[in-house]
Image (cartoon, helix red, strand yellow):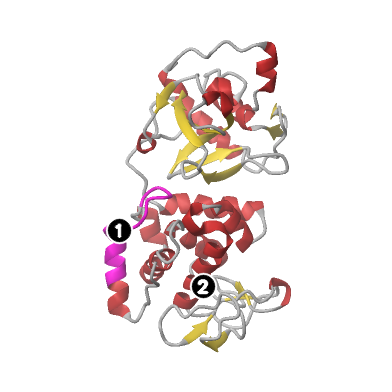
Amino acid sequence: MKKLVIVGPLVLLLLLGMLLAGLVTRIIGGGQPSLGAMRDVPPTYLALYQAAADTCPGLPWPVLAAIGKVETDHGRLIAAGVLEGANTSGAAGPMQFGIGGKAGNTWGGAPVHRVPPQLGYGTDGDGDGIANVYHPADAIFGAARYLCAHGAERGADLPGAILAYNHADWYVTKVLAFASGYAAGPAAPLPSGPAVEKAVAFAYGALGTPYSWGATGEGYYDCSGLMLRAYQQGGVQLPRTSREQWYAGARVSDPDDLQPGDLVFFAYDLADPSTIHHVGIYIGAGNMIDAPHQGAVVSMRPAISRGDYIGAVRPTAGLAQVAPTTTAAGAGAARP
């Protein structure tokens, strides 16, 4: 997609108008900003995040905005390296690009340089012929280029792109949490009754807990073990494995109908539920909480944008159908 250049206040106002009209890709919770985003993100930054994300199909603007929030509170952080110089790691500007030292030089060249040449991700976002790491337009367009090059393009590996930006699992979780809050999702209130509220609250409380295959608590979870314990808090007893849990509620066929608390499932063969290999709990805005895999921790991640998403179940709405009879060997082979 052709780069959108910011040339002045009038263009910023036009971009903001487009953003408010919702003319963006619905990947994380919809195109329009939530009320929380409108209150927290400065209007000029909001337009820049949208315009920059538009240069990378598959990169949701709320993710770009969430990175700006975590890094410098959208340029409002009072600290070395935000408006000038660099922090102790060598990061600079509102998006905290490396300009030397421990952070490396991902910006490429001097913090302020003419373009071309372009040695790294330093970008002329405002069309003045200079890539200035301290200018919001340049830094935000540069961040979009960096994320796009590291997995965000067409949503190939959005968590991986965020992890590449700052190499820490907690960072990915925090960015996606803010992104969920910035995106205005469909009007789907939390289902009534305590079961879902307690299940979702339990899942949030488990964030950061290490994964262990076959674990259902006591400091470790696997994917279905986390779902089991979460719904037990609300008095709903789920089967043990993800493949069995697929039959433990009413099917939610349309992703637009998903509500917080729904179980979202992933399979190797989308036409064959017996190949289900993973499950998470939907929390809204296109995201879920899950226990991903060995070596990872319970995290908040995109859900329905994954290519192996097979569907969802609402445990509080009764049984959709009877699970097929499973032999002892088959039950043991089913991945949690």
Label drawn at residue 44: none
Q: Which sits in the foreground, 131 or 228?
A: 131
Q: What residue is rendered at 72% in x and 30% in y?
A: 218
Q: Is residue 279 above or below residue 36?
A: above
Mark 1 Cα-neighbour bin, 10 Å: few <14, some 14–19, many ≥20 = some
Q: Is residue 8 left or right of residue 221?
A: left
The image position of residue 10, as x and y in percent, is 27, 78
The image position of residue 227, as x and y in percent, is 57, 28
Q: What residue is rendered at 67% in x and 39% in y?
A: 293
Residue labelled with disc 1: 23
Mark pair 1, 2: CA separation = 22 Å
Magenta-drawn stretch contains 18 = yes
Q: What residue is rendered at 51% in x and 83% in y?
A: 131
Residue 75 makes an appearance in the image = no
**Highlighted magenta segment, given as a residue range:** 14-30
Label drawn at residue 142: 2
- Quadrant position of the C terminus in the picture: top right
Secondary structure beneath dot 2 equals: helix
Q: Which sits in the foreground, 92 or 36?
A: 92
Residue 298 makes an appearance in the image = yes
Q: Is residue 260 left or right of residue 222?
A: left
Q: Quadrant of residue 237?
A: top right
Instruction: Mark 1 and mark 2 in contact? Answer it, CB < 8 Å.
Output: no
Give the residue type that dot 1 points to. Leu
Q: Which sits in the foreground, 118 or 181?
A: 118
Magenta-drawn stretch contains 25 = yes
